[in-house]
Image: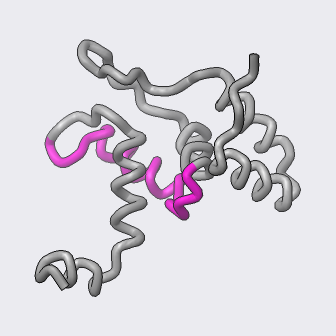
Amino acid sequence: MKPTKTDAEVRAMALLTAKGDTELAEKYLEWIYSGSTAPKDNTGARFVPPTLEEVRLYCIERSNGVDAKKFYSHYTSNGWKVGKNKMVDWKAAVRSWEHNSNASPRDNFADYYGN
């Protein structure tokens, strides 16, 4: 039985189809239904860097505007480290980039001063 599509998946499919990129849309669906997600419990699990394609598909799924190629190049060049620590969850890193790219200086000011 196929899983049902989430709103993000439907939006991503519509975006890819509208751009005429049906090959990427088909890869995206294959990726979703393959169940290739990171394990929920990372204890004992070894980090495996994602492919550029996996990062692109995850960014499309989240509709976050993160430049997947820039993200991939950044972490590939520094050995998939966050600071001095080895990366544990690349999807969490994408979400951090998403959050940081959406925050304006005014948002940071309001958060700091509680306005």
Reply yes or no: does residue 30 show up in magenta: no
Quarter of the figure with the C terminus:
bottom left
- Looking at this view, is 67 or 5 the one in front? 5
Magenta stretch? 62-84
Tell me how the rendering is colored.
one colour
Q: Position of residue 9 (x, y in %)?
A: 67, 45
Q: Position of residue 25 (x, y in %)?
A: 78, 43
Residue at 38%, 58% in the rendered image: 97
Q: Position of residue 5 (x, y in %)?
A: 70, 38
Residue at 62%, 51% in the rendered image: 60
Q: Is residue 102 above or below residue 63?
A: below
Reply yes or no: does residue 66 show up in magenta: yes
Q: Is residue 71 above or below residue 80?
A: below
- Looking at this view, is 24 or 74 the one in front? 24
Compared across the picture, whether 56 is left or right of 18 comes to: left
Q: Position of residue 17 (x, y in %)?
A: 84, 53
